[in-house]
Image (cartoon, rainbow, N blue to C red):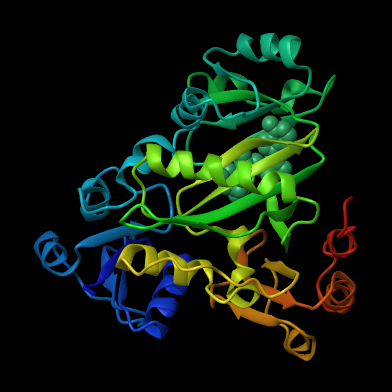
Amino acid sequence: MNRVLVLGGGQLGLMMAEAAARLGLVVDRYDPERALLLPGTSDLAVPVSWEECQERYPVITVEREAFPEEGLSADLARSDRCVARGALQVIPDRFTQKSMLDKLGIPTAPWVTLDKAEDLQAAVAQFGGVVVKARTGGYDGRGTWIVGEGGDLSSVPAAELAGKAIIEQKIPFRRELSIVGARSISGETLFYPLTRNWHVDGILRLSLAPANACSDLQKPAEQMLKGIMEELDYAGVMAVEFFEVDGQLMVNEIAPRVHNSGHWTHEGADWSQFDLHVHALAGVPLHALNVHGPSAMVNLIGTPFESAWLQHPGVVHWYGKSVRPGRKVGHANLVADTLEGLRKGLDAWADVLPEGYQAVLDSELGLG
Ligand code: ATP
Ligand code: MG
Ligand code: MG
């Protein structure tokens, strides 16, 4: 195949390039911040022009949702070669994203816009607990304010957010789940099993796949993701985060890219989400997937590399980034034959991770 260009210079694009290299395909990366091209998995960064991109890259994909307003990355993201072009017009703004979900009849947390500061009080009267979300730019819980029923609203900068945020009802969910799947250039689709996710301070800490007791939810989740990918005429891997409430799924948000909650697929499935993404863009048929027993993915957040990790069962993926509090610097995948085996593996990891991990690693992996 010809080369694929991924817009973004982060670890997700790097993992796509690694997968591509192993599959005999080529993914190059364009770093919008440095305005430089990174060929394949190389660190060598070189300038590139619109004309060279046109010549080399018939397919353009993305590893993130937000790009500078102007410049080469903006032009490439808007070009008709970009398989995420439609998604980028809708997903990055929570107003247009939620409006699309409503239009498609896909359940999502009830919501209103925050147009003026007083709307917050009105939403509290309507919903009880609320979650205020900046329309654009939020991630890892940044740009999100959760205020439970009767909670203190003073932490929400409502006047500052006027016209730039939405307010959702706070959902008393039982679990958080996600689905990762792919749609190929020719419209074929393939999905991983639902994954259960645990967040701490708005940041994903732990994923477990396949999530337990989800057999009734798998098909509805696939149908929702398929409907969204078709609506956006999207190709590649996309993820949807859900709340499970009263045995039903409600969409929290959509990520038009490979997703952190799909990182378990590196060791937990025969084709990882990065393999699948590259195959979907290269027009390789998306054959059935084998999932290798229960898998857990532990995000390594704001912690230096520890050689003790390597003495435990599990595979470490280290991104080589500088360590800052709250920054995702790697992940570790554990695969076992049984949930009990996975439990043992996570217990061992709990001993070698910093404080703050123990509670989540102790989580009930069953129905809980
Ligand atoms: P990500 O890093 O996944 O992109 P984000 O910053 O875009 O996260 P959300 O996923 O919208 O933010 O919200 C972060 C977390 O806050 C959710 O995973 C969930 O735990 C909680 N949350 C968000 N919306 C609601 C809601 N309506 N009701 C209850 N909890 C919520
Ligand atoms: Mg998000
Ligand atoms: Mg999220």
Residue found at x 30% / y 45%: 85
Q: Position of residue 338 (x, y in %)?
A: 84, 74
Image side of residue 109 versus residue 57, left or right: right
Judge by depth and name the residue closer to the eye, 88 or 355.
Answer: 88
Is residue 149 visible to us here?
Answer: yes
Image side of residue 263 versus residue 52, left or right: right
Judge by depth and name the residue closer to the eye, 154 or 116.
Answer: 116
Q: Position of residue 36 (x, y in %)?
A: 26, 68
Residue found at x 62% / y 29%: 108
Q: Position of residue 50 (x, y in %)?
A: 13, 59
Residue 30 in which image quadrant? bottom left
Image side of residue 87 versus residue 341, left or right: left
Is residue 30 visible to us here?
Answer: no
* Quadrant where the N terminus is found in the figure: bottom left
Q: Position of residue 337 (x, y in %)?
A: 80, 78
Residue found at x 61% / y 64%: 328
- Work out whether 254 lies above or below 296: above
- The mark tally for this picture is 0
- Work out whether 9 lies above or below 172: below
Image side of residue 367 versus residue 304, left or right: right
- Work out whether 249 lies above or below 122: below
